[in-house]
């Protein structure tokens, strides 16, 4: 290809690069796009995007292993990427194995053979290195000065998108963590293992929602809103909530107000997630046949998300010990629940739940395995297990 055509090709790619990364607020997606585009534009065999983890003083990157991905971490200062992050200067070498700064760790991990390497720092507004772009093995030649200039340009364009995405990721995580911790408050008094109960409600609801074919975002919303379904229980007196025996009719009447208390706490919420939590709180004890509370809603009058949480909630309540009852066996639970399809439960949701049962059992089995190894989980554990994974955080 002639020089001129090459330049034109790169300009076209550059325009596409800007288009694809602008507005991408998911760090995960952004890193994938960056790696793809940079590799393509530079004519390299590989591209790795490293980000600085300032807490651990490490660089991390995602590498493809087989069909999946793994997060790889290297101490700041180690290897070529580490050198670039630490010094803020670019590195361009023809044969990595003859460079003292090169660390073989990643190659031995991936089974890849690095030859030429071009690496430039990704700098924030203040000129501090927040990461490193590294391209490997230029096809049929070495990276030249023009490549270096180009990679610097790409890094400059990408830096603010990366910063933005990190900011969004933090916001998203702290929002979800706050919601989760709020749910903890509500369940703290009457659950012996609060984290476990919330984890169950969250995971099972999301699994069933996905089985019902709901779109990704709705599944994620129910995953994070469902743990708040009983937030209204904070307003129920100890004498009722913690009563070891059966409630009197009057006590049960008071107990039955918890969906309304919860909905009041969440009403007029600004975010769609909390609005959903409000609807779930209000309707998670409605029954499909109209015999539930607080409003006696029927069938499709009950929001679908609440119909899902209702099934999942009863399953978890029956199979675990409560202050007022022992744990039922899976067989007893099943017999009861299949009997309730069309009564308590939406038959469609009950059916989806049945289909998901192998997956749910898997979660229960893993838990039992983990417990016998580590002993009983502390009640605040499991937060990171529910929050979206963020490879940049511990
Ligand atoms: P929870 O313990 O989380 O139970 C949620 C739902 O699971 C119940 O909603 C009910 O549909 C089902 N469930 C739980 N245990 C049993 C059971 O032993 N038999 C049957 N057939 N279903 C069961 P429900 O009944 O509207 O209760 C809402 C909440 O009221 C319960 O949440 C619990 O906190 C409280 N509660 C209900 N009954 C009693 C009781 O006899 N004593 C005490 N201390 N609390 C109760
Ligand atoms: C809980 O286990 O506390 C939630 C169940 C409910 O309100 O029915
Ligand atoms: C009971 O069987 O009375 C306790 C559980 C419930 O309220 O559904
Ligand atoms: Fe409830």
Image: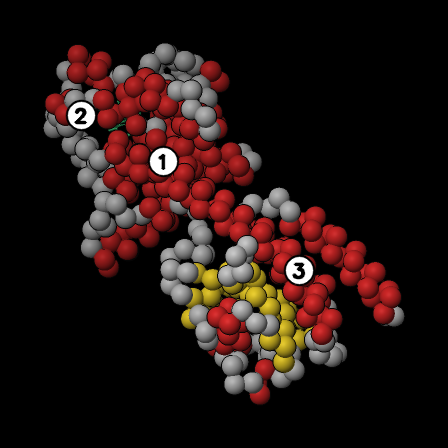
Q: CA distance from mark 2 to mark 3?
A: 59 Å
The residues tagged by marks 3 and 1 sit, at their Cα atoms, a distance apart of 37 Å
Q: Considering depth in this image, is 269 or 119 the residue closer to the camera?
A: 119
Dividing the image into 4 quarters, which one contains the N terminus? Answer: bottom right
Real-space Cα distance between discs 1 and 2? 22 Å
Task: Check mark 2 vs ligand 1: CB closer than 8 Å? yes or no.
Answer: yes
Where residue 234 appears, as percent x and y from the top left, is: 23, 26
Label 2: few (<14), some or many (≥20) within 10 Å? many
For residue 179, which numbered disc appears in the image? 1
* Label 2 vs label 3, nearer the camera: 3
Q: Position of residue 79 (x, y in %)?
A: 50, 76
- Looking at marks 1 and 2 on the same chain, the residue that comes earlier in the sequence is marked by 1
Residue beneath label 3, please?
Answer: 154
- Asked if residue 296 lies left or right of residue 318, the reply is right
Task: Give the residue at mark 2.
Answer: 241
> In what element is the residue under mark 2?
helix
Binning the other alpha carbons within 10 Å of mark 1 as few (below 14), some (14 to 19) or many (20 upward) gives some
Furthest residue in direction bottom, as rendered: 98
Q: Residue at x 14, y 15 (%)?
A: 248
* Helix, strand or loop for disc 3: helix
**Image position of 332 with respect to 38: above or below:** above
């Amino acid at each position: 290809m002639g020089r001129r055509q090459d330049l034109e090709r790169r300009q076209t790619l550059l325009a596409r690069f800007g288009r694809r990364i602008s507005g991408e607020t998911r760090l995960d997606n952004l890193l994938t796009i960056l790696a793809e585009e940079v590799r393509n534009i530079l004519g390299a065999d590989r591209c790795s995007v490293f980000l600085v983890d300032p807490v651990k003083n490490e660089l991390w990157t995602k590498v493809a292993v087989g069909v999946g991905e793994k997060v790889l971490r290297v101490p700041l200062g180690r290897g070529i990427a580490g050198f670039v992050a630490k010094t803020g200067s670019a590195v361009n070498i023809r044969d990595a194995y003859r460079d003292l700064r090169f660390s073989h760790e990643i190659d031995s991990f991936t089974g890849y053979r690095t030859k030429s390497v071009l690496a430039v720092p990704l700098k924030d507004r203040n000129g501090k290195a927040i990461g490193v772009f590294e391209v490997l093995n230029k096809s049929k030649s070495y990276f030249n000065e023009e490549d270096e200039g180009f990679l610097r340009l790409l890094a400059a364009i990408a830096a603010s998108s990366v910063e933005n995405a990190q900011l969004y990721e933090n916001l998203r995580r702290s929002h979800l963590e706050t919601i989760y911790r709020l749910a903890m408050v509500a369940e703290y008094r009457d659950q012996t293992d609060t984290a476990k109960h919330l984890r169950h409600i969250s995971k099972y609801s999301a699994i069933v929602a996905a089985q019902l074919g709901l779109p990704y975002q709705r599944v994620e919303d129910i995953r994070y809103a469902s743990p708040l379904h009983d937030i209204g229980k904070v307003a129920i007196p100890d004498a009722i909530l913690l009563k070891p025996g059966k409630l009197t009719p009057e006590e049960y009447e008071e107990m039955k107000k918890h969906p309304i208390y919860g909905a009041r706490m969440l009403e007029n919420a600004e975010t769609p997630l909390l609005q959903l939590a409000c609807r779930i709180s209000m309707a998670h004890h409605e029954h499909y046949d109209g015999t539930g509370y607080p409003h006696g809603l029927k069938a499709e009058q009950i929001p679908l998300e609440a119909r899902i949480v209702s099934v999942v909630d009863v399953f978890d309540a029956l199979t675990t010990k409560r202050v007022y009852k022992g744990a039922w066996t899976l067989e007893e639970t099943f017999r009861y629940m299949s009997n309730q399809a069309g009564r308590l439960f939406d038959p469609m949701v009950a059916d989806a739940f049945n289909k998901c049962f192998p997956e749910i059992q898997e979660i229960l089995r893993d838990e039992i395995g983990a417990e016998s190894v580590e002993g009983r989980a502390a009640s605040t554990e499991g937060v990171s297990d529910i929050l979206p994974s963020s490879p940049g955080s511990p």
